[in-house]
Amino acid sequence: MPAFAVKQKQAAHKQQTVTVSALGLSAWTGLTDRRHRQLAEQGFFPAPIRGQYQIDATLTGLFRHLREQLARKNDDLSIEQQKLARARREKTEVERDLLKGDLLHKDQVGPALRNLALHQRATLQYKLEQELAPGLAGKTPVEILQEVRRAVDAICLVFEEGTKKWMISEP
């Protein structure tokens, strides 16, 4: 009898059980017997008995396995499509904001920020070295703290005015 021949066995309860050999099932599905046994262990269909698979239960289980694989693949595809749609939407939103002038490129903002930071540094250095430090000699700690607070307020005011001026100027 050929290896892939289908056999009919008489069950004890007078029902016929149609089986197929492991080699015959492999010829039909293109899967190895090892893979069939893995699927049987995963509960898709009953394990073979003496190398014979029950055709009805095995085919039903194989189709269920294939449907689940297809659903999983479709889920993965759906997720990727959602990611692509989100990326396209975000890109469109950025392009719209650029056209409206709500966003600026780094190369437009960078030099202005660098100039602002350099101005703030120079102001800070001047205030601390030229105005604050010379005036602290001979003062008590309480007086020094008051002078430092005044200097901090003055420096913050300069920075705030510089930032306001920068924000209302054209890019």
Image (tube, helix red, strand yellow):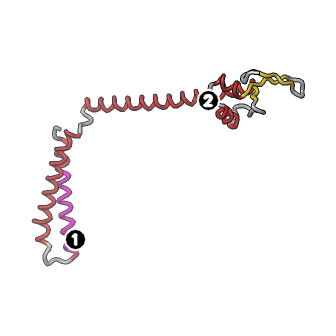
Q: In the rendering, which numbered label is found on residue 68? A: 2
Q: Residue flagged by tag 2: what amino acid is it?
A: Glu
Q: Which one is closest to the eye, mark 1 or mark 2?
A: 2
Q: Residue flagged by tag 1: what amino acid is it?
A: Leu
Height in image: 155 above or below 169? below
Q: Position of residue 72 (x, y in %)?
A: 57, 31
Height in image: 34 above or below 117? above
Measuring 77% from the left and 21% from the top, which residue is drawn there? 1
Height in image: 168 above or below 62? below
Residue of label 1: 145
**87 inside magenta stretch:** no
Measuring 66% from the left and 34% from the top, which residue is drawn there? 34
* Nearest to the observer: residue 45 or residue 75: 45
Q: Position of residue 129 (x, y in %)?
A: 12, 66
**In the rendered view, does 105 fall on the left or right side of 63?**
left
Mark 1 crowd level (few <14, some 14–19, many ≥20, 10 Å Cα): few
Q: CA distance from mark 1 to mark 2?
A: 73 Å
Measuring 58% from the left and 27% from the top, which residue is drawn there? 70
